[in-house]
């Protein structure tokens, strides 16, 4: 009787562990997609109104209920920015092979929307991104 109970308990534990591992695997895949979606929303812009206040408002680039203190936008097509990470290892931080037009936005700390940003057009610059799953997920730095 004790052996049967022990085997049954071990099988239950194995199934629970397997279920947990599958759940974590699914969530990690969604996290990568969400990270790219966040990167795209916060840093890639190919629209007509290239002003910091409008881009931040349109894309809801906030930290909680406050304005994000600093943010940069790459003025380019999504596919051009995605190509930076093609064939790169996960978690690799790499420099864009070609320069892109970049706008830097800066506001006061703790400001609440509507946000008012100082805008600086940096011109064509190379920038560093971190890649996961062949897509950019973090805007790391920029050559100024």
Image: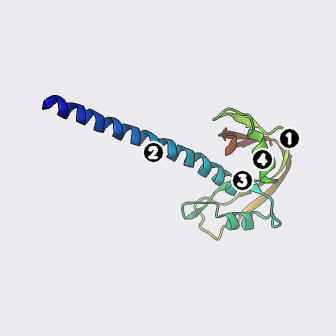
Q: Tell me whether the residue at label 3 lies in contact with that at label 4, contact meaning CB atoms closer than 8 angstroms.
A: yes
For marks 2 and 1, give the one nearer the viewer.
Answer: 2
Q: In which quadrant is the N terminus drawn?
A: top left
Question: Residue 111: image x %, image y %?
Answer: 60, 64
Q: Give the label on residue 81, or none.
A: 4
The residue singled out by tag 3 in the image is 43
> Between disc 3 and disc 4, whose residue precedes?
3
**In the rendered image, the vertical position of residue 32 relative to residue 107, given as above or below:** above
> Between disc 3 and disc 2, whose residue precedes?
2
At 68% from the left and 32% from the top, the residue drawn is 89
For marks 4 and 1, give the one nearer the viewer.
Answer: 4
At 81% from the left and 67% from the top, the residue drawn is 49
> Between disc 4 and disc 1, whose residue precedes?
4
For marks 3 and 2, give the one nearer the viewer.
Answer: 2
Label 1 neighbourhood size at 10 Å, few (<14), some (14-19), many (20+)? few
Q: CA distance from mark 4 to mark 1?
A: 10 Å
């Amino acid at each position: 009787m004790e052996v049967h109970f022990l085997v049954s308990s071990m099988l239950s534990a194995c199934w629970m562990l397997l279920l947990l591992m599958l759940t974590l695997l699914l969530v990690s895949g969604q996290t990568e997609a969400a990270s790219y979606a966040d990167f795209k929303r916060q840093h890639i812009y190919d629209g007509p109104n290239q002003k910091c206040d409008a881009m931040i408002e349109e894309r809801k680039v906030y930290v909680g209920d406050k304005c994000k203190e600093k943010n940069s936008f790459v003025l380019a097509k999504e596919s051009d920015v995605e190509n930076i990470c093609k064939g790169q290892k996960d978690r690799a931080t790499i420099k864009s092979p070609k320069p892109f037009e970049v706008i830097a936005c800066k506001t006061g700390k703790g400001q609440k929307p509507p946000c008012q940003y100082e805008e600086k057009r940096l011109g064509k610059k190379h920038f560093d991104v971190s890649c996961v799953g062949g897509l950019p997920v973090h805007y790391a730095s920029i050559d100024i």
